[in-house]
Image (tube, rainbow, N blue to C red):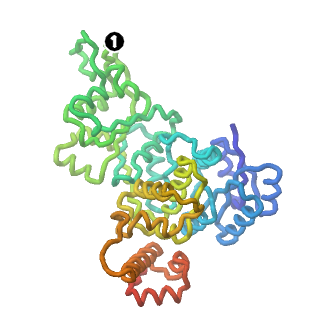
Amino acid sequence: MTTSVLYLGCPPPERPETEKLLEAANVGVVWADNVAYALSELQRHDMPVLLDLSRGAAALQSAREIRTQRASTLMFAVVDTRRPELTTEAVLAGMADVFARPLGGRRVANAIVRELHHGSRPRGDRAAADLYGHSPAMRDVLAMITRAAAMRAGVLVRGEEGTGRQVVARAIHSIHNDDPAAFVVVDCAAYDGDDLETALFGAAPRGSTVDETRPLERVSRSGRLHDVRGGTLYLQNVVEAPARVQMRLSRLLRDREAIVAETGQPIDFDVRPMAGVSTSFETAVHEGRVREDLARRLSVIRVDVPPLRNRREDIAALANYFLREICASLAVPPRTFSRSALSLLAAMPWRGNAAELQSVLTEVVGGGHDARTISLDDVLAHVRLDGAGASFGSGGTLKQARARFERDYIAAVLEQHRGRISDAAKALGIQRTNLYRKMRSLRVNRDRRS
């Protein structure tokens, strides 16, 4: 079934390729060059709007005009990654999602379905939904995903806890495979002793014997490895797998062939192996906790997922995505962010990465207040600037506590905006002169970076 979108402001040279990408995902396009024509088309047929923000303030004014006359119209923004500040402006303007160039047809189609059906997409079918490539670090990841998807080799997805390693793996899998059942996740830490071996290889049937003339691994029809043939095997916590299981896995991936335990017949074992690992994986291999031959077969391609603190340009769009999903799952009206709340989220250290951001927003939305806009105070009730919880306790008077908070918050926002006073003042909602005065009184240093 084809969905139509109205695309306002797309540069004409980009239209043929954009139309091809969208049509490949069953998304038809109606082009518009100005607000008047867009509104006339929307009057005839209500449809989601893609708004190109390359014109900056003028494009945002177009969004406000459409919103004024058509409050219920679903709107999405398309931004240039060279202007990350427009992502924040798009979120504050009430865009349902923000897409970066080059536009991905499936990404747009998934977002439209998600919004039209108010979060009805299965939670496990995340694919590339969380992979916001607005930052240079994530654009490198997206390039590696495309390269990895073209091969059937082992992929090692490496990153801190909460960075979305499984999301990256699903994105690689989904580029050439639309069947979510063909993506099998096995958490090696979730099994005790021989249970992992049984879960992967299955239990040997009674009376079965080993054919010593065919020294291949035996896989029972009851094992996950039998289910995953033709698909992707994603291993979590492979460091926790017993040595015998690692040996059998390595041999199976080497031979690409197995014996069906129930019949004794050989079968091809065409599986793409992936593993989500921490940044200390190489240490585990060096210490012998992971077999070198297994590590080698799992890491033909390596994708390093950056921590959220190294991709702050993505936080506004990612927070917006999480917020809309959370509101849908809790069956509450959609919420929006105030500018100060979004600035604080973008400045936080997020030691738990995207998973921590999602958890905080779930607590904020589930807090029980009915306000449609999430304020700075709403966020502050659930975080602290050093990322260690919701308590600010350091003693002292209320005035001293307020001064500590203002100093840390202003320093964090200045860091987010690389020391640019005008941008930081705008994010804080104060005049430049006021910001300078507060920096002097609170002894906040300006660390300007290019």
Q: In the picture provided, is 264 more to the left or to the right than 53?
A: left
Residue at image position (44%, 63%) is: 311
Residue at image position (45%, 48%) is: 145
**Vertical comparison of 429 with 203: above or below:** below
**Vertical comparison of 361 with 375: above or below:** above
Residue at image position (34%, 24%) is: 223
Q: In the picture provided, is 295 more to the left or to the right than 416?
A: left
Given residues 208 and 147, the one toward you in this image is 208
Task: Measuring from the top left, give residue 393's x and y in whole percent.
Answer: 32, 72
- Say which quarter of the image contains residue 300: top left
| Mark 1 residue crowding within 10 angstroms, few (<14) / some (14–19) / many (20+) | few
- Which residue in the structure is indicated by mark 1? 263
Given residues 72 and 23, the one toward you in this image is 72
Quadrant occupied by the N terminus? top right
Task: Measuring from the top left, give residue 403's x and y in whole percent.
Answer: 39, 82
Residue situated furthest left in the rendering = 287
Element assignment for label 1: loop
Residue 352 seen from this side: yes
- Say which quarter of the image contains residue 408: bottom left
Q: Amino acid at mark 1?
A: Thr
**Vertical comparison of 178 with 410: above or below:** above
- Say which quarter of the image contains residue 191: top left
Task: Measuring from the top left, give residue 314's x and y in whole percent.
Answer: 49, 61
Residue at image position (45%, 79%) is: 419
Quadrant occupied by the C terminus? bottom left
Q: In the picture provided, is 277 more to the left or to the right than 31?
A: left
Residue 133 seen from this side: no
